[in-house]
Amino acid sequence: MSSEEALKIAQERDLDLVMISPVAKPPVCKVMDYGKFRFEQAKREKEARKNQHVIEVKEIRMSPSIGENDFLVKLRNGQKFLAEGNRLKVTVRFRGREMAHTDLGKQLLERFAAECGEIAKLDKGAKLEGRLMTEFLSPKAQTPPKKQPKQEKAKETN
């Protein structure tokens, strides 16, 4: 129908004529309450923002001469960060004469990545930048457990 007829119908119903798709041939319009439409759209966007998870990059720092128990504590913290869905930056800091033994730091980072291998994948391998050797790990994509329908759940509890 023509835009004049549509505008007339919208005015009779005390609503607005909203252009949905202006590039279509012919353009698509809809008769609706525009204020209500904008309110519902803002409400949906707010709900979407509330449900999204921001991925942070957490960092763990070690030295090449770290003790076994200290390493295990750092490993446990790193696995916790990965389980929460965050990326992980593992850093080994070399001080003084430790720079002569960068291979120890590389072995430490490789061991850390191997220990986290079940829950994480290696993004960037060990790389020496100045006095810091870093590697990046990110969590593996996990499929959430399937939800059971309510009827089946009720049968199991009886």
Image: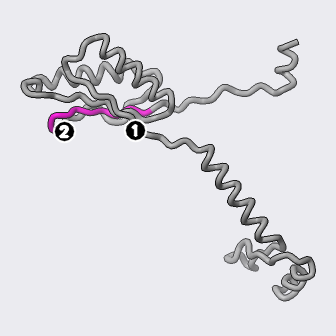
Residue at the (26%, 24%) spot, across then down: 62
Q: Quadrant of the N terminus?
A: bottom right
Instruction: Give left or right: position of 113 versus 149.
Output: left
Query: Which is more toward the observer, 80 or 107?
Result: 80
User: Disc 2, disc 1: CB below 8 Å?
Assistant: no
Instruction: Please provide percent x and percent y for residue 154.
Output: 86, 19
- Dot 2 or dot 1: first in sequence order is 1
Q: CA distance from mark 2 to mark 1?
A: 18 Å
Judge depth for marks 2 and 1 and give the one in front: 1
Regarding mark 2 in the picture, which secondary structure is present there? strand
Query: Which is more toward the observer, 112 or 14?
Result: 14
Residue at the (45%, 28%) spot, across then down: 81
The residue wearing badge 2 is 129
Instruction: Please provide percent x and percent y for residue 143.
Output: 60, 30
Q: Magenta segment, which residues? A: 129-138
Image quadrant assignment for residue 70? top left
Image quadrant assignment for residue 150? top right
**Looking at the picture, which amino acid does disc 2 mark?**
Glu
